[in-house]
Image (cartoon, rainbow, N blue to C red):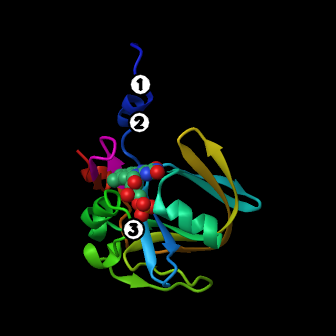
Amino acid sequence: MKEITLPKASKLTSPNPVTVVCTQKPDGSTNLATVSWWTYLSYNPNMIAYAMAKTSYSGEMVRLNKKVVLTIPGAAISDAVLGCGMTTGCDTDKAAKFGIELTLVEGSSIQIPIHSRVAIVCNLKEYLEVGDHYLYICDVQKVYGDEAEEGVFAWNGYGKIAPAKQGE
Ligand SMILES: Cc1cc2nc3c(=O)[nH]c(=O)nc-3n(C[C@H](O)[C@H](O)[C@H](O)COP(=O)(O)O)c2cc1C
């Protein structure tokens, strides 16, 4: 083996997970941000975590409201989800810009993409400074799933979002 960088390693581990982090803006609308760095943490109690750059608008919103929904996007919105990962919601309504239809799930006032395979409704428990990111540790309130929606993954770093079997 040869020594490589951590970003290069994340390409070698491709396909990596993709979630859409849904947070509420001050006007009540939903901000959508694409995040690969998320993980299950605990089943008892149910907990998950995700890491976002300190500068992200989503981070600002979850630190403010203490509420977030993580969704696994369906294949129908792959390209739109890539767009959500290249634009900040600070001054853009990403759902409108990328044509993502939203809906509500019980137990949350944050809207989520209709085309979601999984939705995990969370309360922020705490966040930790980890280098240039914050790690958001969340208590899971509700979990929803739709097997008819095909889940997607990030290929070649952040280069492409596609189902696992069609990624290359
Ligand atoms: C496939 C993909 C995966 C991404 N994963 C992460 C991630 O794990 N953490 C992160 O901070 N940003 C990640 N990003 C970049 C953010 O989505 C991007 O910075 C976005 O503009 C943040 O939006 P916001 O400012 O509205 O929160 C990813 C982007 C793409 C396309």
Q: Nearer the viewer, mark 3 or mark 1?
A: 3
Mark 3 sits near ligand 1, with its Cβ under 8 Å away:
yes
In the rendered image of this protein, does residue 22 appear above or below residue 9?
below
Question: Which quadrant of the figure has residue 139?
Answer: bottom right
- Label 2's element? helix
In the rendered image of this protein, does residue 104 appear above or below residue 134?
below
Q: Nearer the viewer, mark 2 or mark 1?
A: 1
Among the two numbered marks 3 and 1 on one chain, the one whose residue lies closer to the N terminus: 1
Crowding at label 2, few (<14), some or many (≥20) Cα neighbours within 10 Å?
Answer: some
Furthest residue in direction top, as rendered: 2
At a point 61% along the width and 41% down the height, the residue shown is 130
Residue beneath label 1, please?
Answer: 5
Total count of labels:
3
* Nearest the eye: 37 or 33: 33
User: Which residues make up the magenta segment?
Assistant: 153-160
Q: CA distance from mark 3 to mark 1?
A: 30 Å
Residue beneath label 2, please?
Answer: 10
Amino acid type, mark 3: Gly
- Labelled disc at residue 89: 3
Amino acid type, mark 2: Ser
User: Which x, y percent locates residue 129?
Assistant: 64, 45
Q: Which quarter of the image is occupied by the C terminus?
A: top left
Amino acid type, mark 1: Thr
In the rendered image of this protein, does residue 80 appear above or below residue 16?
below
At a point 40% along the width and 20% down the height, the residue shown is 4
